[in-house]
Image (cartoon, rainbow, N blue to C red):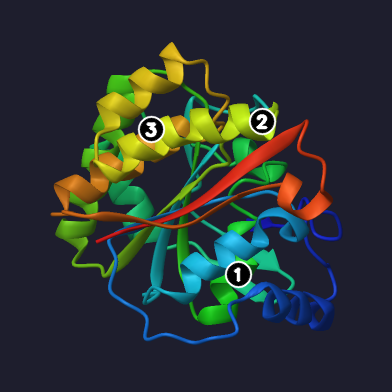
Amino acid sequence: MVRKPAVAGYFYPKDPVRLLEMIQHISPKATVKPIKAKAVVSPHAGYMYSGYVAAEVFSKVIIPETVVIAGPNHTGIGAPISVMRTGVWAMPLGDVPIDEELAELIIDKASHAEEDYTAHLAEHSIEVQIPIIQYFRRDIKIVPIVIGTKNFQACVELGIAIAEAITESGRDALLVASTDFTHYESQKSAAQKDELALSAILKLSPGELYRVVEEYNISMCGVMPTISVLSAAIELGAEKAELIRYMTSGDITGDYQQVVGYAGVIIT
């Protein structure tokens, strides 16, 4: 199956030349030697808002051939944990095949995961990551996972299954948790709440992340994918997480009354 872009021309330019120009514009001007990472946390809003954070994160890590991307289900369509097992994503910067062997292994090992493509057709949280990743490495394969469940244990188990599948396959893979943080609150409120969520991520604590998001009503859309990715990274031996950049939509628009928070984190 060929999965066509759902938000090209909306969240990012559809034209490849304009797309490359935009990613170049939002990428850091000073280059640094990229490091080996287990995982990253990256936002998925329109590039004019969150692209600066995403581009800075991906510019700082070595991108292997296989990238496992877990994002939230905004549409409500499809299985609670939907893994697209076969096919190609036809993106403006070139086709991106699915790593079918790894996708199948994850489905086999994760009792709550299902092979399902319907959740992916209109969902933007994974799609928006891909052109920026392609900017830094074109020849990638992906395993796209859309998560709609709020079941904490299911998401932890998914993360462990992802780690086991990566280990068994011998893949050198980068894990990506696709998430924005607080939605449509004041700059002050968003910064305070997002600091709590980020503190849990930087401690590599999926349990604390889940707790603070629930307790403080943090509208972090990708909390469950982040829990899965944290769990996978820990299983793969992660020891450290670093906040690369935090900003809000207000930093772009100048409207600090209703902002969305964006954070980039690298886990090594």
**Which residue is at 21% across, 40% downward?**
160
Local secondary structure at mark 2:
strand
- The residue that mark 1 highlights is 132
Q: Note whether 252 is above or below 205 in the view shown.
A: below
What residue would you read off at disc 2?
183
What's the residue at 50%, 34% (across, down)? 194
Mark 2 or 3, closer to the camera: 2
Contact, CB < 8 Å: mark 2 with mark 1? no
Q: Is label 2 in contact with label 3 (beta carbons under 8 Å)?
A: no
Q: Which mark is residue 113?
A: 3
List x then y, in percent, for residue 146: 52, 38
Query: Gap between marks 2 and 3, in whole Å?
Result: 28 Å
Q: Amino acid at mark 3?
A: Ala
Q: Is residue 95 visible?
A: yes
Instruction: Give the camera-side residue of 247 and 231.
Output: 247
Position of the N terminus, as image quadrant, is bottom right
Q: Amino acid at mark 1?
A: Ile
Left or right: 214 with respect to 240?
right
Asked if 146 appears above or below 17 in the picture, the reply is above
CA distance separating discs 1 and 3: 27 Å
Q: Amino acid at mark 2?
A: His
- Front-most of residues 38 and 67: 38
Q: Quadrant of residue 173?
A: bottom left
In this view, the mark in front (1 or 3): 1
Callout 1–callout 3 Cβ contact below 8 Å: no
For the C terminus, which image quadrant?
Answer: bottom left
